[in-house]
Amino acid sequence: MMESIENNIKKAEEKWLNKLSLFCQNLFIGNKIPSHDHTHHLRVWNCAKKILFAINQTTKINYELIEGILIACMFHDTGLTVTLDEYHGLESKKICEQYFLENNFSKPSNFNEILNAIQLHDDKDYKKKAGNPASILSVLCNADDLDAFGRIGVIRYTEIYLLRGINTTDLPKKVIQNLDKRFSNFEKAYRFFPSLIKGHRERYLITKNFFEELLKEST
């Protein structure tokens, strides 16, 4: 009999969460990117759990998928300690590979899928996203996007865009364009779970309304 999703999440967290969170926290020491540090990675994992619970209503989620998504969540933005470039997923992938190598950890059976998801999560044009909403890549990418919504999203967008040299006058328009892509992809991927969509639509609108008002004031 397949274990419940609650038990599988608990098992995966007991195995990985503390050690990966500590690793991530130490990695970001000295890097002034608080909007994308270990707390962001933990929030993304919490968003991923909400997506998994929604999917589990129609498709039972196994331990391997949960474990893979947790690991991917905790490594996906670590590459920002190497480069602030929009496409930092490859560096994140390298850090994950090195972590498993140096600690001699046994790799999960879906390790290649984990690495692929980490590398491709930063494609916010969604050209390479998997069609399966229950894949590691889809859950990781959308969970990451959900953390760009709400008031925390205002902080995250502003900090990372300014660090990348985007002019303050261009900031609102660029954020809105990116934000709309993220929500559109999320809505398309999880359209069969209206309650999930509804809750995060409200958070998306909080962020969008803020930058729309900012755009009005700056033009």
Image (cartoon, grey):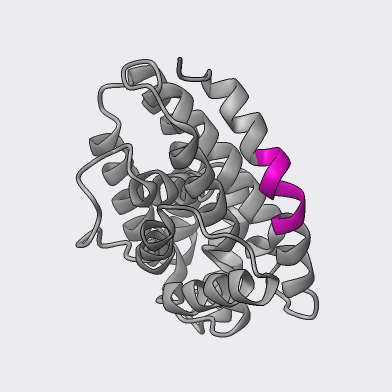
Magenta stretch: includes residue 3:
no
* In the displayed structure image, the side of residue 122 where residue 207 appears, left or right: right
Instruction: Indicate the quadrant where residue 14 lies.
Output: top right
* In the displayed structure image, the side of residue 156 where residue 123 appears, left or right: left
- Up-down: is 147 above or below 174? above
Quarter of the image that includes the N terminus: top left
Residue 179 in view, yes or no: yes
**x and y, in percent, of residue 89 in the image:** 44, 72
Magenta span = 13-20
- Up-down: is 85 above or below 157? below
* In the displayed structure image, the side of residue 133 where residue 121 appears, left or right: right
**x and y, in percent, of residue 96 in the image:** 55, 70
* In the displayed structure image, the side of residue 21 where residue 116 appears, left or right: left
Q: Residue drawn at (69%, 70%), measured in percent from left and top?
A: 103
**x and y, in percent, of residue 214 in the image:** 50, 57
Q: Residue drawn at (44%, 38%), measured in percent from left and top?
A: 205
- Up-down: is 95 above or below 133? below
Q: Residue drawn at (79%, 70%), measured in percent from left and top?
A: 26
- Up-down: is 196 above or below 127? above
Residue 28 in view, yes or no: no
In terms of depth relative to the viewer, which is nearer, 180 or 146? 146
Magenta stretch: includes residue 16:
yes
Magenta stretch, overall SS: helix
